[in-house]
């Protein structure tokens, strides 16, 4: 199966939470494709972020403003099953989780699918892709972490490129309709290299929200276009 259309997925972890709706509206108007929603629980990871009520509020705001973009919820929580239905009800389109956070990975994936969402697994830098072996039929997205989860603004771990290539090979061999996403340290300067390794969905937090330009009509037009230009080279 051919590589899928490239999606740029701004991580709202780096947005201004005092004006979250406005930031999301502007970044999608600038040409981004997906809203990436990082959920941390101060348990599985040493940080605490946002829950389903924020997701629900953002979804309502997007609907009211006519903003059309899927919400991609990355759950860094343990245990994960309890919170999945809440995010599905709050408007999530994709829900991904870490295999270490589930006692029964197959069941957690079935739970997400049963709630009407697309499902995926997330792989930390030191987590083996072997978890995919028996669940590829239930996967819509594979997310490779190019930083350790829990904090924004970390530097990209180069070894993630090799893991991307391995995941791309598994997807291609399966013949299944699966997106390959990366999260952590993605910016204009390295997005082409990441794409060349097989990625099609690019999460970027500070690499986008930290590059707002007051001279742009939608504040993020310049940085999104720079990313598109780089992706065209890959």
Image: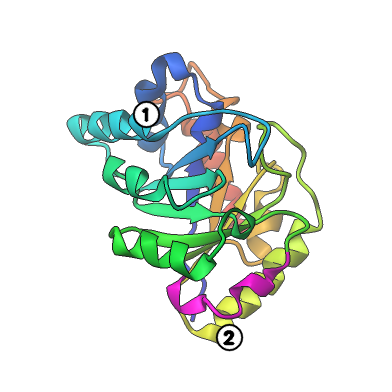
Question: Is residue 186 positioned above or below 125 on the image?
Answer: above
- Report the disc number at residue 26: none
Task: Using a 10 Å C-alpha cutoff, classify the residue at mark 1 as few (fewer than 14 neighbours), some (14 to 19) or many (20 or more).
Answer: some
Q: Nearer the viewer, residue 142 or 189?
A: 142
Mark positioned earlier in the residue sequence (2 or 1): 1
Residue 209 x/y as whole percent: 54, 27
Q: Nearer the viewer, residue 152 or 196?
A: 152
The residue indicated by pointer 1 is 54
Q: Decide if residue 5 is on the left or right side of residue 206.
A: left
Q: What colour scheme governs how the chains and residues are painted in the rendered image of this protein?
A: rainbow
For marks 2 and 1, give the one nearer the viewer.
1
Q: CA distance from mark 2 to mark 1?
A: 38 Å
Question: Is residue 171 positioned above or below 55 on the image?
Answer: below
Residue 141 x/y as whole percent: 49, 63
Q: Is residue 33 visible?
A: no
Residue 168 x/y as whole percent: 62, 73
> Quarter of the image containing the C terminus?
bottom right
Question: Is residue 193 positioned above or below 22 on the image?
Answer: below
Specify whether residue 200 is painted magenta: no
Residue positioned most to the left: 64
Question: Is residue 124 positioned above or below 169 on the image?
Answer: above
Q: Decide if residue 227 is on the left or right side of residue 220.
A: right
Kindly identify the residue that appears in the image at 49 percent across and 19 percent down: 16
Specify whether residue 131 is painted magenta: yes
- Report the disc number at residue 173: 2
Magenta part of the protein: which range?
A: 128-139
Kindly identify the residue that appears in the image at 56 percent across and 77 percent down: 171
Q: Is residue 4 visible?
A: yes
Task: Using a 10 Å C-alpha cutoff, classify the residue at mark 2 as few (fewer than 14 neighbours), some (14 to 19) or many (20 or more).
Answer: few
Q: Secondary structure at mark 2?
A: helix
Q: Secondary structure at mark 1?
A: helix
Q: Nearer the viewer, residue 124 or 114?
A: 114
């Amino acid at each position: 199966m051919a590589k899928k259309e490239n999606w740029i997925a701004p991580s709202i972890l780096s947005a201004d939470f005092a004006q979250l709706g406005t930031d999301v509206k502007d970044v999608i108007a600038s040409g981004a494709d997906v809203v990436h929603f990082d959920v941390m629980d101060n348990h599985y990871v040493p940080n605490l972020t946002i829950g389903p009520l924020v997701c629900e509020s953002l979804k309502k705001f997007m609907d009211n403003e006519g903003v059309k973009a899927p919400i991609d919820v990355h759950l860094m929580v343990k245990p994960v099953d309890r919170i999945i239905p809440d995010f599905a009800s709050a408007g999530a389109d994709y829900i991904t989780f870490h295999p270490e956070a589930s006692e029964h990975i197959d069941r957690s994936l079935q739970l997400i699918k049963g709630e009407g969402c697309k499902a995926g697994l997330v792989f930390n830098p030191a987590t083996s892709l072997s978890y995919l072996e028996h669940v590829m039929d239930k996967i819509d997205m594979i997310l490779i972490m190019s930083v350790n989860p829990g904090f924004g603004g970390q530097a990209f771990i180069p070894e993630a490129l090799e893991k991307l290539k391995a995941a791309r090979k598994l997807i291609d061999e399966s013949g299944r309709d699966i997106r390959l996403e990366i999260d952590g340290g993605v910016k204009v300067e390295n997005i082409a290299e990441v794409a060349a390794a097989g990625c099609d969905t690019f999460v970027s937090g500070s690499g986008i929200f930290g590059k707002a330009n007051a001279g742009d009509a939608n504040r993020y037009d310049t940085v999104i276009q720079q990313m598109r230009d780089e992706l065209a080279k890959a």
